[in-house]
Amino acid sequence: MKRKEIIEALQAEDFTKYYEKANEICLRTKGDVVSLRAIIEFSNICNRQCAYCGLNVDNEKVERYMMTEEEIVSTAKEAIEAGYRTIILQSGENTGITLEQLLNVVGSIKAIDKDVAITISAGELNEEWLKALKEKGADRYLLKHETADPILYKKLHPDSSLGERIKALKTIKQLGLETGSGFMIGLPGATVETTADDLLLLKELGCHMAGIGPFIASPDTPLKGRKDGDVELTKRAVAIARILLPDANLPVTTSLGVLNGEERKKAFSCGANVLMRKVTPEEYKDKYSIYPAKIPPTNIEKDRKDIIEMLKEIGKKGE
Ligand code: 5AD
């Protein structure tokens, strides 16, 4: 799809043919499987000022934490025992964790099961760190480009630029890590043209994964009180991402589920094939508040079983 067609499709009265196409491609490339991933939010410390994010450095209301190596590894072990085959290690940027600590964690998780995939998502790390992580066994790296509009990017991230972000994504890819990007729908100042450019950037980068989710206004951020991203536009963007990148892993983001649980289910027939579950220990979970979301307490195993049941109801196998 070219830019013009994408812009038209995103605004079309009837989007059915694109949903059908995306679903058909997804069934061909991914079958009826939804891949479940366990996400451990190991630190909410961050030195960035991203205007949309509840964890930005200027938010003094956040009680900052960093899990110990032992806590991270034992959480990963519990998730693997519950059946997860991918562990995502996520944090803010420049949390204070050392490269040595992060390498230890990756090594220890691989020692539990070498075939478990490890995804790191800890902001823009330098090449030395990325290379060392890859050598230690990290498989994937997740770094969303957030918005493909360079002016909007600069406005929302006063301490960096879209160019730097794209450079980091290219380094990740060059190093042979599976590369994940993604973006938000409905950031204040974004238009359908921005969304079309976001989608084309995913294609240009040749992403292996892309998380596309609605913006949710977060209190205690410069964007508090702004309008949330549109759920329908989010699903349309996911469908077009599936058409542009047939083999990519496309999660239904937590933010979509937060805005609308029913629509989250529907996204699995619009091209999405991945679901990430927070397995962060209860004592930290609420402190990792990127945007307001009520996540009822549960345990890793039960949550996974419940999700597999929910997926069964819509004809999908959670694995
Ligand atoms: N609303 C929705 N998504 C957000 N993210 C950050 N802040 C918000 C928000 N207010 C997303 C970004 C980031 C990911 C961890 O969460 O895309 O990469």
Image (cartoon, rainbow, N blue to C red):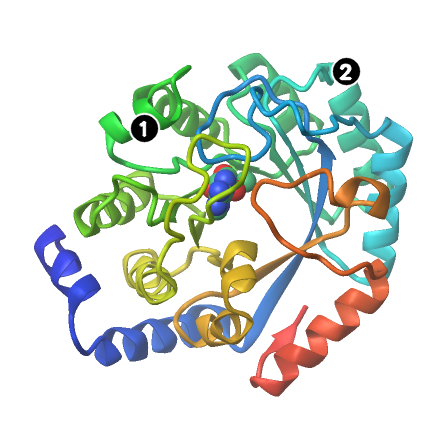
Image-quadrant location for residue 55: top right
Residue type, numbered disc 2: Glu
For residue 100, which numbered disc appears in the image? 2
Is residue 180 shown to the viewer in this render? no
Tag nearer the camera, 2 or 1: 1
Question: Which of the two discs, 2 and 1, labels the residue nearer the N terminus?
Answer: 2
CA distance separating discs 2 and 1: 32 Å
Question: What kind of element bears circle 1?
Answer: helix
Q: Nearer the viewer, residue 57 or 179?
A: 57
Name which residue lies at 64% across and 19% down.
Answer: 132
Is residue 54 shown to the viewer in this render? yes
Residue type, numbered disc 1: Tyr
Name which residue lies at 55% across and 71% down.
Answer: 261
Image-quadrant location for residue 29: bottom left
Where, quadrant-wise, is the C terminus in this rendering? Answer: bottom right
For residue 153, which numbered disc appears in the image? 1
Query: Where is residue 253 shown, x and y percent of the image?
Result: 52, 56
